[in-house]
Structure formats: structure tokens, C-alpha cells
């Protein structure tokens, strides 16, 4: 019996290192050009720093909303949007994409663009509706979770020029921009709680809809452009800086409405006699 225990102990000592990794070690497998699996140890630091910063911004937004600092909470969500846009581009530019980075980015998005906007809206206005406020906020959170899950399972399968459903950062911009702009006006969220709840729930429904939204991923950011383009960019920053809360909210309202408007335009175009099936082109 002692011989069996000695064998089991020895066998266990040999298996543990392959089953349980040290806490500071991450191993990721991917297939190389020849189809064989390649094991990589560790994670890429640079893109994950941006993702971590976006996650912190979402967490800060939640804490600020709990303290009643709704403007700071909304601004933190917009900061998270900028950081979320940078992490993917940095990863592509430095060729540091990884499955770990993609999963970490989704979890960060769920906090910054799923949980945080719903809690900011709830703390500002929806709490006055009681259980109905909980329902409105949960519809948004559930919509964000379902939208992210659907996006992750359809990577590479869809036309990159369009998003299916409202992207979670855009939905967060719609809700956070509303709180920021109206609170700057001195509006008490409790006075318009039902309207806030309907807009928050609508953002959640649009995220899981089949409405197409432009992704703007087909824009060539590396090529040369005429000089006046940079002047337009500078002018755009100047206009936004004059009244950032209201202008940013209007931008996200316009983008949110663009999907349904373009869908109706396509349906009307297809209903004409002799119209060809829609290929997604505008």
C-alpha cells in the first residue's frame, strides 16, 4: 500500500505543474501558419494598459454616481470610450492582438459601457421610479451583455463596415450624455425619471436589434488626406469644446437615430418596382 501511495504522490507531483499554473503566468495557444499549435507565455502589456485604464474609468464612474457626482461619472464614461478605441488600434499597430486581450476588452466594456451607464442613470433619476427604475436599468445592462456576447461570437463573420445593433460605447454615450447634459442644465433627474427610463431601455433594446449602424472601420486612417481635413478636425474639436456635454449628446443622438433612418430608407428603396435586393450599400 505504501508503494501505491508513493507512486500516486510521485505521479501527482509530475502532473500538478501542467494543470495548475503559477498566479503570475499566462499561457495562450494559437495556430501558426503551418496549422500547428504554438504556446505563448505571458500577455502583451501596452494594449492591456489601455484596457485596464478603460476599466478603471468605468469603475470610477460607478463610484462617482454613488457619491452624486453625475457630471464626473459621465465624463469618466466618455474617457473610457476614448481608451477603448485606442486599445484595439494600438494592438493592431503593434501586432499584439491576443485572445486574452479580446476577452479582457469585453469584460472591461461590460463594466464601462454596460453596468456604469445603467447605474449612473439609476442614481440620477431611475431610483425615483422604484421597481420600474430597476427594470429600465436592467434592460440596458442585459442588452449590453447580450450585444457583447453576440459581437464576440460573430467576429469575422459580418461586414466590417456595419455594426449589427447599436454598439455598446454608443449606447453608453447616449445615456451618459443625457445625464451629463441635463444635469448641467440643472434638471433634476427625478422630474423626468420616466423619460430617462424609456431612453435607457431603448438604448438597451437597440443594442440587441438587427438594425445596421455604420462602424466607420472602412475609413483610411493611414493614407494621405488634403490639408483642409486636419483643419476640419481642429474645427470639430473647437466646436465640441464650447459646450462638450450638449454637443456630444447631440452627436450620439444623431448616430443612434441614423440606424433606424437608414433602415427605413433601404426598405423604401427596396419597395420600389424593379428594385434590386439590398447588398448593404447606401
Image (tube, rainbow, N blue to C red):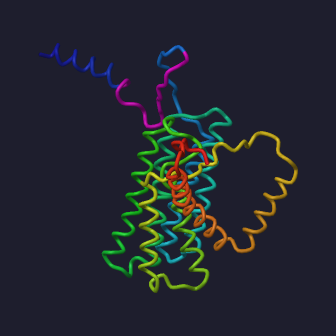
* Percent x, y of residue 217: 63, 44
* Percent x, y of residue 179: 54, 74
Kindly identify the residue that appears in the image at 51 percent across and 58 percent down.
264
**Closest to the observer: 271 or 26?**
271
Q: Is residue 236 magenta?
A: no
The residue segment tinted magenta is 17-33
Q: Is residue 19 magenta?
A: yes
Q: Is residue 221 left or right of residue 170?
A: right
Q: Where's the N terminus, which quadrant?
A: top left
Kindly identify the residue that appears in the image at 46 percent across and 70 percent down.
199
Where, by quadrant of the figure, is residue 46 drawn? top right
**Closest to the observer: 90 or 225?**
225
* Percent x, y of residue 192: 46, 83
Q: Residue furthest right?
A: 227
* Percent x, y of residue 168: 50, 55
Rendered view: 49 above or below 175 = above
Kindly identify the residue that appears in the image at 53 percent across and 13 percent down.
34
Rendered view: 19 above or below 255 = above
Rendered view: 245 above or below 98 = below
Q: How many marks?
A: 0
Amino acid at each position: 500500500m505504501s508503494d501505491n501511495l508513493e507512486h500516486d504522490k510521485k505521479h501527482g507531483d509530475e502532473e500538478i505543474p501542467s494543470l495548475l499554473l503559477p498566479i503570475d503566468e499566462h499561457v495562450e495557444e494559437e495556430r501558426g501558419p503551418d496549422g500547428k499549435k504554438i504556446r505563448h507565455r505571458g500577455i502583451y502589456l501596452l494594449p492591456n494598459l489601455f484596457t485596464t485604464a478603460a476599466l478603471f474609468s468605468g469603475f470610477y464612474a460607478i463610484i462617482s454616481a454613488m457619491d452624486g457626482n453625475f457630471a464626473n461619472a459621465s465624463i469618466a464614461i466618455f474617457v473610457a470610450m476614448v481608451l477603448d478605441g485606442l486599445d484595439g488600434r494600438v494592438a493592431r499597430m503593434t501586432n499584439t492582438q491576443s485572445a486574452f486581450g479580446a476577452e479582457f476588452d469585453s469584460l472591461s466594456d461590460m463594466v464601462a459601457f454596460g453596468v456604469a451607464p445603467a447605474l449612473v442613470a439609476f442614481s440620477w433619476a431611475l431610483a425615483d421610479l422604484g421597481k420600474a427604475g430597476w427594470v429600465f436599468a436592467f434592460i440596458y445592462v442585459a442588452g449590453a451583455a447580450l450585444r457583447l456576447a453576440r459581437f464576440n461570437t460573430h467576429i469575422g463573420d459580418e461586414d466590417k463596415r456595419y455594426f449589427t445593433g447599436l454598439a455598446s460605447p454608443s449606447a453608453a454615450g447616449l445615456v451618459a450624455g443625457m445625464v451629463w447634459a441635463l444635469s448641467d442644465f440643472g434638471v433634476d433627474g427625478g422630474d423626468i425619471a420616466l423619460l430617462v427610463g424609456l431612453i435607457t431601455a431603448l438604448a438597451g433594446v437597440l443594442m440587441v436589434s438587427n438594425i445596421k449602424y455604420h462602424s466607420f472601420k472602412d475609413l483610411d486612417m493611414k493614407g494621405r488626406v488634403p490639408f483642409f481635413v486636419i483643419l476640419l478636425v481642429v474645427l470639430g474639436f473647437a466646436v465640441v469644446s464650447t459646450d462638450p456635454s450638449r454637443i456630444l449628446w447631440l452627436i450620439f443622438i444623431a448616430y443612434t437615430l441614423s440606424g433606424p433612418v437608414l433602415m427605413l430608407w433601404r426598405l423604401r428603396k427596396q419597395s420600389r418596382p424593379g428594385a434590386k435586393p439590398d447588398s448593404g450599400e447606401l
